[in-house]
Amino acid sequence: MIRNFPRQWKELFVYVKLSAVVYGATALATKSLAYSGVTYVTKVVFKSAKLIPTMLVGVIMDARAIKKGNTNVKKHNYTVWDYGSALLLCIGAAGFCMSPKDSSDSSEENLTTSTQGPHWMGISLLIGSVFCDAFVPNISEQLMQQGPTNTISSMTRKDSGEDLNGDEEVELKSLLASNSGPNNNNDNHATAATSKKKEGGLSSASLMVNTNSIGFALLFLSTVISSQLIPIVSFMAVHPHFLLLHLTVGCGLGTAVLAYTELIKRSGPAFAVAVATLRKVVTVVLSYIIFPKAMTITHLASSCLVLAGVAVGFAGKRRSRRQT
C-alpha cells in the first residue's frame, strides 16, 4: 500500500480532488440545515436521490476518460430499466427514512430554527452535496482501474526513446537476462499477463490509505489555521472517554468505507450507491424490529416502491441477457 502512494503532484492532485468532494458532500449538506426551509427531512430526500446523479456523472466521466485514450476504463451503459429502477429506489428510500414526527413537525421546525439565509441557498448547497456524492464513487472507480503508473510510465519512456536512470536500466537488464532462455516464451507471456493484471488495478485498501492520508493532512492543516487544535486536545485531555468513542466510531466507519470501496471496484459505482440506498431502508426496518412502533401509510407505500425498484432492476437485467 505504501509503494502505491502518489509521489508526483499530478498523481497527488487527483487524491486532493477526491478528498475535496468527500469533504464537500458532508460539509455542504450540514451547512444547508442552517438555511430557511431546509430540514433534516429535506436533507434525507436529497441524499436518497443521489443514485441517479451517480449514474449520469459516471457516464460523462467514462466518455471523457475514453476520449483521452484511457483503455482501462469500464464503460457503463445504463438502460431505461436501470434509470426507472433507480428512480423508484430513490423515492422509496426517501419516504422510508421519513418518520411521522419529521413529516408532521417540519413546518414547526422551520419556525423555531434560526436561519442564516434564503431557502434557495440551502437547496443549492444540498444539490452541490448530492453531486459531490455522485463524484466520489466514480473518481474512486477510475483510480482503482488505472492503478499505479510507475512501472507503466517507465516502460513508456523507454519505448519513446527517453533515457532511464541507472536503477531502471539494471532492473530491465536483469529482467531480460532471466528471460533469455529458449524455453521461456510461454512463461514470459504468462508472467507479463500476470504483471499487467497486477499493475492494472489499485486495491481498495491502497485507495483508502492514499485518500485518508491526504484528507487527514488537509483537515489537520485547516484545524491549525482556524486555531481549533488546542481546544480539541484540551477537551480530549479532560474527557478521555470521548477519544475512545471516536476511535470506536472510526473503526466502524473505516470497515464500512473499505467494504463500500471494494464494492465499487467489483460491481461499479451505481450498484454500490444502490446498496447504500437500500441500507437506509434496512436500518429503518431494524429500528421497527428492535423498537416496535406503528407502521405508517408512508412507510408501507415506500416499501412497495423499493420492492418495485428491485423488481424493475431484475427485469431489466433479464431483458438485456435475452438480447445478448
Image (cartoon, rainbow, N blue to C red):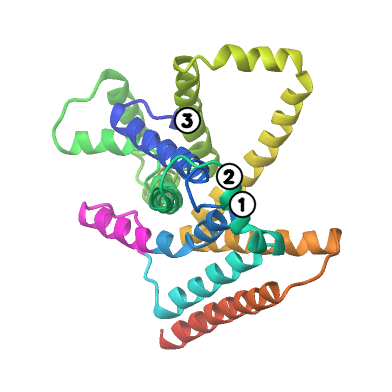
Q: Amino acid at mark 3?
A: Gly
Q: Is residue 97 visible?
A: no
Instruction: Please give the range of residues in magenta.
Output: 56-75
Q: Secondary structure at mark 2?
A: loop
Which residue occupies 58% across, 44% down? 113
In the foreground, 170 or 239: 239
Q: Quadrant of residue 248?
A: top right
Apparent side of residue 77 relative to residue 10 in the rendered image (left or right): right
Query: Would residue 60 be counted in the magenta stretch?
Result: yes
Which residue occupies 70% across, 77% down? 297
Among the two numbered marks 3 and 2 on one chain, the one whose residue lies closer to the N terminus: 2
The mark lying in front, picked from 3 and 2, is 2
In the foreground, 313 or 115: 115
- Considering the whole magenta stretch, tell me its main secondary structure: helix
The mark lying in front, picked from 3 and 1, is 1
Mark 1 surroundings within 10 Å by alpha-carbon count, few (fewer than 14), some (14 through 19), many (20 or more):
some
Residue that badge 1 annotates: 109
Give the numbered dot on residue 215: 3
Q: Amino acid at mark 2?
A: Thr
CA distance for labels 3 and 2: 32 Å
In the foreground, 209 or 200: 209
